[in-house]
Image: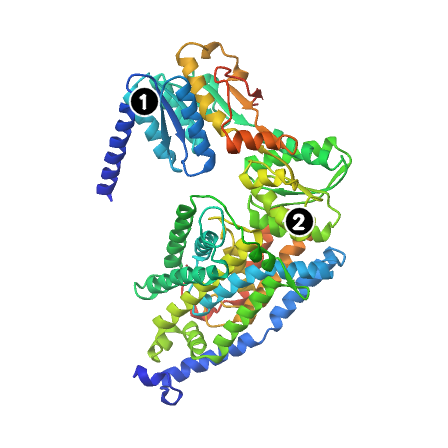
C-alpha cells in the first residue's frame, strides 16, 4: 500500500483529506497580513519612541545584522514546530557545534585548520544530534519536548567536557570578516539566513517532504492512516533542523571570533518567540519559512527599539514574555487541544 | 542506582584514604573548592599547594563539582579522619552551605576560613574556630573600573554600561560602584545602560544598538570581561577600536591581551593564587596559636581583601606575574591584602 501512496495517482481517501487539510493550512500561512501589520506597528512605535532614529539607514542595517543569527535558529525550530513537535535541544546542540567548530577552525588549542571545511563537519554533528532527537521521539515514542530537552543537556555537557569550560579563540580571520561584513550595505548574516529561508520555503512548498510535513502537523493520526511514513518525515525534519543549528553555531562563533561551551545559551527563547510571533502555530501544521522571517524581524525590531528607547532592562524581559503569550494566544489551534496541561 | 551510589562512595573513600595516607604525620590542610576544570579554582589549588610546600606540608584538595551536599560530606569525612588535626580553606558552593559547614567545623574544633558569600545573619564572631570570612568588594571593583576608564577619557564624555544578570548581588554591587564614580565625575555622562547577563553575545548585540543611538560614545563600562570583550567586537566592527575603550572585571586572558593592545583600559583580577594560600595560612596560624581568634577584632574576622587592579600602565607586569609566571606572596603576612570590614 505504502508504495503507491506516494504517487499522485494512487491517493486514497485518507491522504486526500490529509493533503486537503495541508493545502488549507498553507493557504492560511500565505496570508501574511497579520505579521505585516504587527511589524509595521512595532516599527512605528520604535520610530516614535526614538524620534525617527530607529528608521535611520544605519539602524536598519544594524537590525538586519542582529536578525541574521536568530533567523537561522528560528528557521530551524519552526520546521519542528510545523510537524507538531517541539525542539528544546537548540541551545545544547548549538553549544556543541560551536565547540567542535571552534576546535576545527584555526585555534590555539588544536592543530586543526580546516577553514571552510569545518562547516560541513559541524553540520554533520548537528544533523546527528537532530537524527537522535528524531529517533528517540519516533522510535522510542517519547514526547519530543522531553526527548529534545534531554538530548540538549547531553550536548551541552559534551560541549563543556570537550572544551573543559574554556573559550576557544578563532585565529582564522576570514570567518569573522565574512560574518561582520556587508554585501552592498546588506549584512552577510541576513543574506545567509534569507538564502536558507528560501531553501526551506522551497522544500515546504515544492517537495513531497514539505507536503507531508504540513499533513503530519495538521493531523498526525490522519497522515499516518493515509500511509505517510510519519516517523521518517519527522526524523528528517529533526535532522535538517540539527544541521541548521550547526550553521547558526558557525555564524555565532565567527561573529565574535571566539567559541565557548556557553555559545548557545539563551538563544532559544527569542527564537521560540519569533516562531510564535511569526504565526507558526505551536499546535503544528500552520505557518512556514516566511512566518519565521517575519517573526524574527518583529522580535529583533522590538528588542533593538527597546535598547534605543532606553527601556529598563528589568522591563524588557517582561515585554518579551507578554509578546510570546499574546502571539501564542492568537495562533494556537484550540480545536486540537482537548486538555490543557 | 543504589548499587552504583554505594560503589561510588567506596571509590571516593578509597581515593580519599590514599590521599590522607600521604599526609598522616602533619596537619591535614583541606582546600574545598568547586572544580579543577575552571581556571579560577585551578589557580586556587596551585596557590594552596604553593603554601603547603612553603611549610613542608600537603594540602587535600576537595572539589564539590557544584554539589553543596558533596562539599559538606567531603569536609566531614576529612574531619572524621583527622579530628582536631585539620584546618580548612573553603569556597562555599552556595552561601547557605556556610551554615552546616561552620557548625561541622565548630563542633570538631577545627579552624577554618571561608570566602565570597555568606548569609548576612550568620556572624563569624559567634564561632570561635571561624578564623575569617573574606570577600572582594564588588562596589570597589566597579568604581575602580569606572575611574580607570574616566581617566583614559580625560574625565569627560559619554559612556554606556553593560550590567550583569539582574538581581545578582555581584552585578548590583559593581553597578553601584559605577554610579558612585559617576557621582564624583560631573564631566561623565551615562547615556545608556542595559543588562547583557554576563554574556559576550548579548553584549555584542546591545553594543551594536548603543552605537547607533550614541555614535559619539567615549567608553564602555562592562560588569565583567566577557561582556567587555563582546562590546569590543562591536566596537572593532564599527572601526572604533582604541578610540572607544572598554573596561571589565575578572582578568580573563583575552581581556589582558586587549588591555595590552590598547583596546581596553583595564580590568580587575581576583587573586585566586593568594586566596588558595592565605586561607590555609590563616587557619594554620590559628591552630598553632600564632593568632588568637578570640581576641582578633571583629573587623578582621569578616573583611574585604584587595583585588588586583589592572591598567594599561601595569599590564606588562601583570602578564609576567599572573599569566607567564606565578605571583610571589609572603604567606606570613596574614592580613596584607586587608581593605576593610564587611558591613
**Which quadrant of the figure has residue A224?**
bottom left
CB under 8 Å between discs 2 and 1: no
Quarter of the figure with the N terminus of chain A: bottom left
Q: Determine if marks 2 and 1 fall on one subunit.
A: yes
- In the rendered image, the residue lying farthest to the bottom is A9
List x then y, in percent, for residue B79. Answer: 32, 22
Task: Please identify the quarter of the rendering in which residue A12 is found.
Answer: bottom left
Chain for numbered disc 2: B
Q: Residue at x 54, y 76 (%)?
A: A28
> Mark 2 to mark 1: distance in Å?
53 Å
Quadrant where the C terminus of chain A is found in the figure: bottom left
Identify the coloring. Answer: rainbow
Apparent side of residue B327 relative to residue A12 in the rendered image (left or right) = right
- Mark 1 falls on what kind of element? helix
Mark before the other along the chain sequence, 2 or 1: 1
- Res B235 label: 2
Residue at left offset 45%, top offset 30%: B44
Q: Closer to the camera: disc 2 or disc 1? A: 2
Which of the 4 quarters of the picture holds residue A164?
top left
Residue, disc 1: B79
Q: Position of residue B40 (x, y in %)?
A: 47, 34
Q: Is residue B63 left or right of residue B211?
A: left
- Image location of residue A219, percent across then percent down: 40, 74
Q: Nearer the viewer, residue B75 or B333?
A: B333
**Mark 1: few, some, or many residues within 10 Å (few <14, many ≥20)?**
many
Q: Using the image, name the chain to which the residue with label 1 belongs.
A: B
- Is A330 placed left or right of B48 in the picture? right
Amino acid at each position: 500500500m505504502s508504495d503507491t501512496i506516494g504517487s499522485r495517482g494512487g491517493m486514497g481517501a485518507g491522504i486526500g483529506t490529509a493533503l486537503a487539510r495541508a493545502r488549507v493550512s498553507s493557504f492560511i500561512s500565505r496570508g501574511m497580513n497579520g505579521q505585516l501589520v504587527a511589524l509595521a506597528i512595532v516599527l512605528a512605535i520604535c520610530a516614535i519612541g526614538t524620534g525617527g532614529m530607529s528608521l535611520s539607514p544605519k539602524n536598519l542595517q544594524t537590525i538586519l545584522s542582529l536578525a541574521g543569527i536568530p533567523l537561522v535558529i528560528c528557521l530551524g525550530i519552526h520546521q519542528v514546530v510545523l510537524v507538531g513537535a517541539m525542539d528544546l535541544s537548540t541551545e545544547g546542540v548549538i553549544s556543541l557545534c560551536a565547540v567542535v567548530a571552534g576546535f576545527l577552525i584555526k585555534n590555539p588549542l588544536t592543530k586543526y585548520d580546516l577553514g571552510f571545511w569545518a562547516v560541513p563537519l559541524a553540520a554533520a554533528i548537528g544533523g546527528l544530534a537532530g537524527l537522535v532527537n528524531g529517533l528517540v521521539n519516533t522510535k522510542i515514542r517519547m514526547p519530543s519536548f522531553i526527548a529534545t530537552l534531554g538530548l540538549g543537556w547531553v550536548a551541552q555537557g559534551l560541549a563543556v567536557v570537550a572544551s573543559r569550560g574554556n573559550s576557544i579563540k578563532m585565529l582564522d580571520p576570514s570567518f569573522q570578516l565574512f560574518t561582520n561584513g556587508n554585501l552592498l550595505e546588506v549584512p552577510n548574516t541576513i543574506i545567509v539566513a534569507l538564502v536558507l529561508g528560501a531553501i526551506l520555503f522551497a522544500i515546504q512548498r515544492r517537495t513531497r517532504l514539505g507536503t507531508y510535513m504540513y499533513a503530519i502537523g495538521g493531523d498526525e493520526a490522519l497522515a499516518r492512516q493515509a500511509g505517510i511514513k510519519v516517523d521518517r518525515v519527522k526524523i528528517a525534519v529533526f535532522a535538517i533542523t540539527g544541521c541548521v543549528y550547526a550553521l547558526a553555531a558557525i555564524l555565532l562563533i565567527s561573529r565574535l571570533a571566539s567559541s565557548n561551551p556557553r555559545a548557545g545559551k539563551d538563544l532559544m527563547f527569542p527564537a521560540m518567540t519569533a516562531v510564535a510571533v511569526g504565526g507558526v502555530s505551536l499546535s503544528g501544521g500552520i505557518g512556514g519559512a516566511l512566518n519565521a522571517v517575519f517573526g524574527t524581524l518583529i522580535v529583533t525590531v522590538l528588542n533593538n527599539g527597546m535598547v534605543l528607547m532606553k527601556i529598563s532592562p528589568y522591563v524588557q524581559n517582561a515585554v518579551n514574555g507578554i509578546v510570546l503569550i499574546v502571539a501564542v494566544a492568537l495562533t494556537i489551534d484550540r480545536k486540537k487541544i482537548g486538555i490543557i496541561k | 542506582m543504589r548499587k552504583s551510589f554505594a560503589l561510588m562512595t567506596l571509590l571516593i573513600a578509597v581515593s580519599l584514604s590514599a590521599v590522607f595516607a600521604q599526609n598522616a604525620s602533619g596537619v591535614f590542610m583541606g582546600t574545598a573548592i568547586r572544580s579543577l576544570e575552571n581556571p579560577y579554582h585551578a589557580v586556587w589549588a596551585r596557590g594552596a599547594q604553593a603554601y603547603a610546600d612553603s611549610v613542608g606540608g600537603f594540602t587535600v584538595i576537595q572539589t564539590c563539582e557544584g554539589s553543596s551536599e558533596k562539599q559538606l560530606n567531603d569536609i566531614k569525612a576529612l574531619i572524621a579522619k583527622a579530628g582536631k588535626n585539620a584546618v580548612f580553606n573553603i569556597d562555599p558552593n552556595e552561601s547557605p552551605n556556610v551554615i552546616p559547614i561552620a557548625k561541622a567545623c565548630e563542633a570538631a574544633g577545627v579552624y577554618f576560613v571561608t570566602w565570597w558569600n555568606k548569609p548576612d545573619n550568620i556572624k563569624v564572631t559567634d564561632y570561635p574556630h571561624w578564623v575569617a570570612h573574606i570577600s572582594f568588594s564588588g562596589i570597589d571593583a566597579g568604581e575602580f573600573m569606572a575611574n580607570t576608564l574616566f581617566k583614559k577619557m580625560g574625565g569627560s564624555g559619554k559612556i554606556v554600561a553593560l550590567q550583569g544578570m539582574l538581581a545578582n548581588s555581584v552585578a548590583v554591587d559593581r553597578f553601584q560602584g559605577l554610579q558612585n564614580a559617576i557621582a564624583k565625575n560631573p564631566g561623565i555622562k551615562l547615556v545608556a545602560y542595559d543588562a547583557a547577563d554576563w554574556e559576550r553575545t548579548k553584549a555584542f548585540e546591545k553594543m551594536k544598538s548603543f552605537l547607533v543611538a550614541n555614535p559619539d560614545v567615549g567608553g564602555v563600562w562592562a560588569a565583567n570581561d566577557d561582556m567587555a570583550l563582546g562590546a569590543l567586537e562591536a566596537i572593532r566592527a564599527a572601526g572604533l577600536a582604541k578610540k572607544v575603550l572598554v573596561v571589565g572585571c575578572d582578568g580573563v586572558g583575552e581581556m589582558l591581551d586587549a588591555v595590552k593592545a590598547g583596546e581596553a583600559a583595564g580590568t580587575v583580577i581576583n587573586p585566586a593564587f593568594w586566596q588558595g594560600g592565605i586561607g590555609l595560612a590563616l587557619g594554620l596560624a590559628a591552630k598553632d596559636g600564632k593568632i588568637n581568634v578570640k581576641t582578633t577584632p571583629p573587623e578582621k574576622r569578616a573583611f574585604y581583601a584587595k583585588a588586583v587592579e589592572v591598567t594599561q600602565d601595569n599590564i606588562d607586569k601583570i602578564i609576567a606575574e599572573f599569566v607567564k609566571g606565578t605571583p610571589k606572596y609572603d604567606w606570613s603576612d596574614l592580613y596584607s591584602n586587608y581593605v576593610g570590614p564587611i558591613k
